[in-house]
Image (cartoon, rainbow, N blue to C red):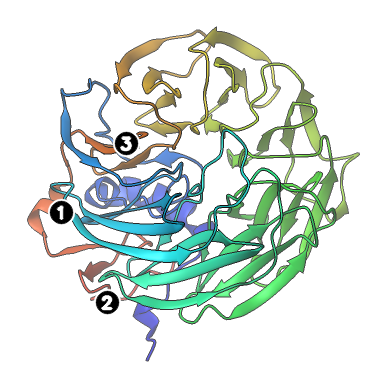
Amino acid sequence: MRTESTTRPGTSVLLAASVAIATLLPSAVSAENWPQWRGPRGDGTSLDPHAPTAWTSVDNVTWKAPLPGKGHASPVVWSDRVFVITAMKEQQQRLLLCLDRATGKRLWQRVVLEAPPERIHALNSYGSSTPATDGQRIYVSFLDRDRMFIAAYDFEGNQVWQVHPGPFASIHGYCSSPVLWKDTIIVNGDHDGPAYIVALDRATGRTVWKTPRPNKTRSYCTPILRQIDGRNQMILAGSKCVASYDPDSGRQHWIIDGPTEQFVASLVYNGELLFMTCGFPDRFMQAIHPGGRGNVTATHVAWQKDRDCAYVPSPIAVGPYFLLVSDNGVATCLEAKTGRSLWRRRLGPHFSASLATANGLVYFLSDKGVMTIVKPGPTFEEVARNELGEKTFASPAISEGQIFLRGAEHLFCIGKREAAWAKDHPAAYHHPCQSCVISVTGRATSRCRPW
């Protein structure tokens, strides 16, 4: 039976809650989990003041765990567990792995799906969708022939449910990472057919709502969720538009047409403007005022540029700055309010991973496994450059003084765990609201604060 203490707040309230907690509960900040694609706020930001900045392939590496198969999905972290998915092409299997955070030891491995490998782009994989976890279940997303496949597992590796919420067809393959919202998970179903967005009940997999998308075009963007101007907004690019929906009902708030056909990078929000970068066949970046209703194409684009845009790597917003890296390795820092370019610097030949930020620094990870750490500002300031010694296509996860990097063959845990609260309470961790304490069984021991 569900109780009030196990009901999770939506992602939209986490931004405001995190700001309050950063001031009031510093130990809770250091104990922040990384529960889904691009972290607790879905935008690559970490509140961790102890994220490492220096390592090599051996130095400052806590552990290095071999991974079976291949995949581009990022790891997710909850307390003492790390979850990652992978795919075994020859065996036609898609797997979910659970690793011990302290040692990298594989605690369990499950075959989630057996299905023929789909057609994919050369830069895609058969395991590209980052899972999500709420501390009780892990939610995974794969393609089962011509249908989207979503499943939930508990922390012991038992399957709770599996569903096929809709069709999916794309010559470039599949990558739809679920995101958490209240008692649902939301998955983007943009594809070359009757495209849709769907919300599923976390406990059962039942479809709560399903909203058709305006154009039948593939895209691979994960939505972000925020409360803006008194409205809950789920915002994503793709299907030849940028659009906002009510995550409780799936009803559309507003839409901006174009500016191109296909999208991969997720949007970010700095409290004033949304920032989008895309795409194919044309590349653009935009700053968008996230208000209004209906079609706001003519009124709500603050600025637009068509130089040094990113297609695959998602950008980052840090204070007054907007940073991104193009797929061919040109990093750019812009003044967020105006779009004025402050600096641009080539960091390497190829980039797929999305940007992350912690402690006022921005992490750029190249496909060659080189992490360049930069302090955002009016001039380029490189803080560190670290080589992992292995190719990397997945985005980093940051939690409690550690960075988790998925290489082509291994999962790396870098840095020491720095959560004083976690050391004092080894059998417990924080609820996604970051204020109440939860036992390792996932049951809340105190009621959530009403942020």
Q: Quadrant of the C terminus?
A: bottom left
State the separation of the CA atoms marked 1 and 2: 17 Å
Query: Where 177 sits versus 401, above or below?
Result: below
Q: Residue furthest bottom?
A: 1
- The residue depicted at 54 percent of the width and 32 percent of the height is 317
Residue placed under numbered mark 3 in the picture: 409
User: Which numbered marker is on residue 408?
Assistant: none
The dot on residue 422 is 1
Residue 444 in percent (x, y) is at 27, 75
Three-letter amino acid code of the residue under disc 3: Glu
- Amino acid type of disc 2? Arg
Above or below for 414 versus 427: above
Image location (x, y in percent) of residue 42:
50, 48
Identify the element where label 1 is drawn: helix
With 109 as the anchor, is 272 left or right in this view? Answer: right
Are the residues at dot 1 and dot 3 in contact (C-beta closer than 8 Å)? no
Residue 232 relative to residue 254: left or right: left
- Could you tell which of marks 1 and 3 lies nearer the N-terminus? 3
User: Would you say 328 lies left or right of 21 here?
Assistant: right
Classify the position of the N terminus by image quarter: bottom left
**Which residue is rendered at x = 43% and y = 50% of the image?**
90
Answer few, some or many: residues within 10 Å of disc 1's Cα (few below 14, many 20 plus, some between 14 and 19).
Answer: many
Residue underneath mark 2: 443
Earlier-in-chain disc, 1 versus 2: 1
The residue tagged with tag 3: helix, strand or loop? Answer: loop
Above/below status of 328 relative to 42: above
Could you tell me how far apart the alpha carbons at marks 3 and 2 are, in whole angstroms? 35 Å
Q: Amino acid at mark 1?
A: Ala
Q: Secondary structure at mark 2?
A: loop
Q: Quick one: 127 or 137, which is closer to the camera?
A: 127
